[in-house]
Amino acid sequence: MKTLEYEGKKVFRKYSLPVPRGIPAVSPEEARTAARELGGEVVVKAQVHIGGRGKAGGIKFAADPEEAEKKAAEILGMDIRGYTVERIYIEEKVDIRGEYYIGITTDRSARLPVMIISSEGGMDIETVAREKPDRITKFNIDPLWGLHPYQVRKEALRTGIDADKARAVAGLAMKLYELYLKEDATLVEINPAIVLPDGEVICGDSKLVLDDNAGFRHPEWESEIIPDVYDPVEIEARENGISFVRLEGNIAVIGNGAGLVMSTLDSLALEGGSAANFLDIGGGALAERTEKALKLAFGLSGIDVVFINIFGGITRCDEVARGIVAVMEEVKLDKPVVVRLIGHNEEKGRRILEESGLNIHIYETMRDATRQAVSFSLGGA
Ligand code: GDP
Ligand code: MN
């Protein structure tokens, strides 16, 4: 599960990682009170489960509490790449002299943690890797040997960070690695790590993904970080026994079986499209669960088309088809739906879809269906 910035920063504080003072808020009035409490200039930051808020207008500066209230009103309710802003974070404004990147994630191919450091923070790390490869470094951490400050200093120097700052970066990196291990994180990122005028380096932003599989040994996640930690759609999905993960594209995806859904995502990417989510309704999907899943997918914000990929084994195609028609009519879906439906009772299922007269496009092969979905997602017919 992914935390919001201010939740991640709560965890950062536990590991003595330096973060600016800040107060979360859900209304312009709360923002005003928070700004008064912080004193001086503040930053009003949208709290959504997605990056790139700065570019999308989700981060604004305010000189006093009145202005903070005004900026909060502008940001609350804003749509940032499909996410509605329901919460903001009011933070003291700091004077920025430089921005770095420090992150740790799990390198599956090396089966080791990997640390990434860059002297070019504040922007997308993928962009830095592409455009300024000499400004970024990446190295695996051997869990038996541990992480040592000299390693981090040596790597940081290679990206152009000077010796003084490299020492500060190493200090942050050591704490970050401790957090990564103890919190069972799969990703933790400081972007930007902000260089202050006095040379100190602090955490300007947080990104933290915790491994759900380790949740049983972290009761404090729920008591200290939740309830805001979850994406509300993910909570609803979980409560209904549906595996759902939010992604960043505009093609809503539904399939039965994790493997099929994964390959659906791959084939969409291969054809130049981008999925809005992962959604597995599971094997032998019951009518009720199917209906819930359809409603979830149809209701996602920022989508242009829905792609339903069903391989009917135990699942009956006619039952799924009936569910699709019923839910489309109920929610009055105004987007095209591409369906690839094969297996048990497929002819019956396809007939139900064809006879519905709804905006449904039926295919037998995954490739044809994928191409149609991608075409819709790019604004084509
Ligand atoms: P993101 O766009 O979602 O990654 O949000 P960030 O928290 O990383 O903020 C984006 C950018 O806003 C940073 O890289 C900074 O340039 C700027 N910013 C954020 N907080 C402050 C602050 O306190 N002072 C100043 N001057 N700039 C800030
Ligand atoms: Mn950031």
Image: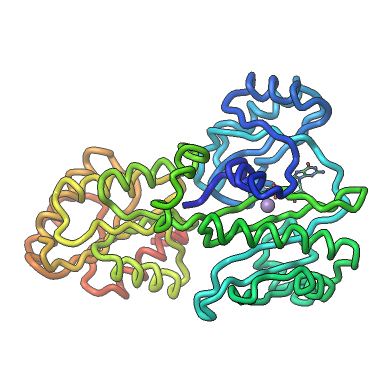
Residue 110 shown left or right of residue 18 in the figure: left
Seen at 8% across and 67% down, the residue is 344
Residue 140 shown left or right of residue 106 in the figure: right
Residue at the farthest front position: 144
Q: How many marks?
A: 0
Q: Image height check: is 257 above or below 320?
A: below
Q: Where is residue 188, by image quadrant? A: bottom right
Seen at 85% across and 55% down, the residue is 98
Seen at 32% across and 47% down, the residue is 237
Residue 22, horizontal then vertical, whole percent: 70, 34
Residue 276, horizontal then vertical, whole percent: 43, 56
Residue 206 shown left or right of residue 278 in the figure: right
In front here: 364 or 74? Answer: 74
Residue 345, horizontal then vertical, whole percent: 7, 65
Residue 280, horizontal then vertical, whole percent: 29, 59
Q: Quadrant of the C terminus?
A: bottom left
In front here: 101 or 213? Answer: 213
Residue 290 shown left or right of residue 26 in the figure: left
